[in-house]
Amino acid sequence: MTADPFGGLLAGARAEGWATEVLDLAGVTGKAALMDRFARVLNLPDWFGRNWDALADSLGDLPARPGSERGLLLFVTGWQGYAETRPEEWAIAREVMDAATGPELCVLLALGGSH
């Protein structure tokens, strides 16, 4: 395994006009930490409410990324531990990400380890 196992995928997405962000959820054990990771990685405003509705609204209204022709590819890694310890919360998070996915946002879940 290379030092950056997802580097080729992310570079290919950028070459196709996508902006890319990696949301590494390794070590996340609850909703508050999950919301903090989303806020940090996506540069959400300070007034982001850190609840499911606010996350859905934020994902549905992300500002355009510089250099992006197609939108944002959000690559989620390290999510398995959170999914195992908080399955109900993870199910809601998946629903929110699924609902937000569209022409401006593509969410991919890595089946391997963390980035």
Image (tube, helix red, strand yellow):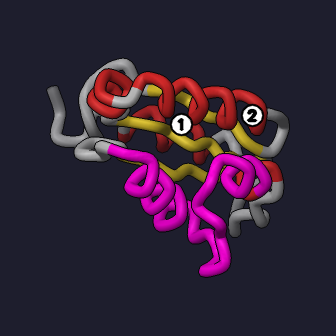
Decide whether residue 25 is among the magenta residues: no
- How far across and down, in percent of the image, does residue 25 sit? 35, 43
Secondary structure under tag 1 reads helix
Magenta stretch bounds: 30-57
The residue closer to the viewer here, 19 or 48, is: 48
Residue 101: numbered disc: 2
Residue at the image point whose x is 36% and y is 40% from the top = 7
Q: Which of marks 1 and 2 is nearer the N terminus?
A: 1
Name the kind of residue labelled 1 in the image: Gly
Q: Nearer the viewer, mark 1 or mark 2?
A: 2
Classify 10 Å Cα crowding around label 2: few (below 14), some (14-19), many (20 and above): some
For the C terminus, which image quadrant? top left
In this view, the residue in front, 111 or 88, is 88
Residue at 70% in and 28% down: 98
Q: In this view, does 42 lie to the left or right of 6?
A: right
Q: Is residue 40 above or below residue 92?
A: below
Q: Nearer the viewer, residue 41 or 66?
A: 41
Residue, disc 1:
12
The quarter of the displayed image where residue 94 is located: top right
